[in-house]
Image (cartoon, coloured by chain):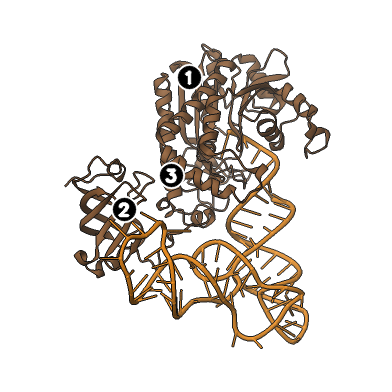
Amino acid sequence: MKRLKIKEILTGEQIGQQVLVKGWVRTKRGSKNVNFIALNDGSTINNLQVVADVEKFGEELFKDINTSTALGITGTLVESQGSGQKVELNATEIVIYGKADPDKYPIQPKKHSLEFLRENAHLRFRTATFSAVFRIRHAMAFAIHNYFNQKGFYYLHTPIITGSDAEGAGQMFRVTTLDAKNPPLTEEGDVDFTADFFGKSTNLTVSGQLEGELGATALGEIYTFGPTFRAENSNTTRHLAEFWMIEPEMAFYELKDNMDLAEDFLKYLIRYALDNCMDDLQFLSKRLQEEEKNKPTEERSMELVEKLRFVLENDFERLLYTDAINILLESKHYKKGKFQFPVAWGVDLQSEHERYLVEKHFKKPVILINYPKDIKAFYMKLNDDGKTVAAMDVLFPGIGEIIGGSQREDNYDKLVARMEAMGVPVEEMSWYLDTRRFGSVPHSGFGLGFERFILFVTGMGNIRDVIAFPRTPKNAEF
RNA sequence: UCCCUAGUAGCUCAGUUGGUUAGAGCGGCGGACUGUUAAUCCGUAGGUCAUAGGUUCAAGUCCUAUCUGGGGAGCCA
C-alpha cells in the first residue's frame, strides 16, 4: 500500500479507505480497552489520531510505543468520535521501526523551555514549535527563489572561501591548512601564507556583494543566497557567527528602485507565508499569546498574523537620515533625556533610536536613506551634497535592521578616492574596480539577513531558534 | 568584549536572618479506568545543590575565581 502523508490524510478525502502512515509518536494515551496515539510525520503541525484496540494488538506492544517511537500504521480512516479532530485512523496493523526509551529520551510530552531545547538542538525538530519554525523557514527559502526567478534575476553562487579581506563587513574566520602549532614563517617572523593551500591568506566570506556586482554588471540582475560568516564576538538574540544572507544586485537600479524592490520583496515573502503556512503561523501565534499573558499590557506585541497583515497592507515609511535626526531631536523622549546615546547629525543611530522611530513614532517598517558618508562603507554612492551616501536601511519592529543596502558608487575616480580615504587596498581590489573601468553603470543592491527575517515571520525571540544548528561564540555543537 | 542575572531531581521551579534527614508540580516506572485530547486517579523511584577554593562550630544559602545559560549594550544582517 502506498504511504500517505498526514497532511493529505487530514483533509478527510480518504474517509472509509485503508491507508498507510509512517511517523513519530507525539503522545500516547492509554486505557484498558483502547489506546490513542497522536502521530506526526512532519508534513504538518497537526497530528493524526490513531485508535488502537488493546485486545487486537496485545498489551505488550503498547509498552514499546512511547513519545518519539517511529511507527508505520495501516488502518481505516474514519470520522472521529472524539471532539478534537475530524478524522482518525482505526489501526489494523502496527509496525515499530524504532523504539524510544522513555527513560532516556529527553523531549517530554510537555512544554519545554526554548533554552533547554536549544541545548538539545538535534532533537528539537520533534517539537511542535520547531517543526513549525523550520517548515516556515523552508517555505521562505523557496519563496525567495520563486520571487527572483519570476523577476528574471539569476541565482549566482559567490564563493564561500574568499581571498579578499576587504569586504569591510567585519571580522573574518581564517581558512588554512597550515600546521597551527608550527606554521612556516617569513624572514620577518610572520606566518608565511604563501605556503598555505591557496598560496595566500584566505577567509570565509562575510558578504557576496562584491562578486555579486561583477555578475550584475553583465547578467543584469542577480541574487545570492548562501551562508555568511562573521567572527565577531557578538552575544545577542540577533547575531550568529554563521548565518544566511540574500543579496540581490541590480544593474541600472538607482536608490529608489532599490527601495521599491526591497519593499516588494519583503511583502511578497510575507504574503507567501500567510498563503502557505497558516497552520504553523497560528500555532506559533497561540504559543506567543500565552507568553504575552505574563507581560504588562503596554509591552505586549501585536498578534502574529495580524502583525504580518499589517506590514503587508501598509507602505513602509521612507525617511531621510537628516529628517530622522530631526524627529529624534524634537521627540519628548529626547527632551526628557531618555536616550542613553547622543543624537546629532553625523552620528550613527543606536538601537534605541531605531526602535523609537519604528516602534513609537511611525509604528511600522521604516526605510532610512542618505546616511552621512563617514559612517557607511566605501562602495556606497556619494550624493550630490558631498556629505551623504545613497544608503538605505530597512528597519523592522522588534528586529531592528533587517536589510542594509545602497546604490553603489559607479564613478571610478570617486570610488578610488573613497577607498584611499578609508584605507581599503586599491591594488588588491583591482578585479572589483574593473566593473567601473569597463562599461560602468548605476547599480544597486542590498543584503537581507535571512534569520532576522524568519524571526519576524515566526515571532520567535532568539535568532538561535530559527536556524537548525546555531553557531555562536563558544558554541559549535552538533 | 562590557553591564545585569541565573545555575538545586529528566524538565520547570521552591528552599526564610547560614542551623537536623533538601521539597513540589510535571515527566518516568507500577497499578486502576469502556473513547482519550499535554487524559484522569492511586502508588513509587530519582539529587556529589555547575566546578574549584575560602569564611564558619555549621554552607544549597556568605565570599573569590572559573565555566555555562538568559537579558541588555556595542559591532552588524
Q: Looking at the image, is mark 1 or mark 3 nearer the viewer?
A: 3
Q: Note the chain letter of the brown one.
A: A
Provide the residue designation for mark 1.
A216
Q: Tag 2, which secondary structure? A: strand
Chain B tint in image:
orange
Residue B48, quarter of picture: bottom right
- Sooner in the amino-acid sequence: mark 3 or mark 2: 2
Q: Amino acid at mark 2?
A: Gln
Horizontal arrangement in the rendering, residue A1 relative to residue A196 (left or right): left
- What chain does mark 2 sit on? A
Badge 3 density bin: few <14, some 14–19, many ≥20, Cα 10 Å: many
A280 vs A386, nearest the viewer: A280
Q: Residue A114 got which mark?
A: none
Horizontal arrangement in the rendering, residue A338 relative to residue A439 (left or right): right
Q: Residue at x 56, y 46 (%)?
A: A462
Q: Residue at x 24, y 65 (%)?
A: A54
- Sooner in the amino-acid sequence: mark 2 or mark 1: 2
Provide the residue designation for mark 2.
A49
- Sooner in the amino-acid sequence: mark 1 or mark 3: 3
Q: Amino acid at mark 3?
A: Ala
Q: Residue A342 in the image: x percent, y percent?
A: 79, 34
Q: Tag 1, which secondary structure? A: helix
Q: CA distance from mark 3 to mark 2?
A: 19 Å
Q: Residue A42 in the image: x percent, y percent?
A: 35, 47
Residue A407, quarter of picture: top right
A355 vs A62, nearest the viewer: A62
**How many circles with numbers are drawn on the protein?**
3
Contact between labelled residues 2 and 3, with CB atoms less than 8 Å apart:
no
Horizontal arrangement in the rendering, residue B60 relative to residue A207 (left or right): right
Horizontal arrangement in the rendering, residue A55 relative to residue A366 (left or right): left
Q: Residue at x 35, y 51 (%)?
A: A83
Q: CA distance from mark 2 to mark 1?
A: 52 Å
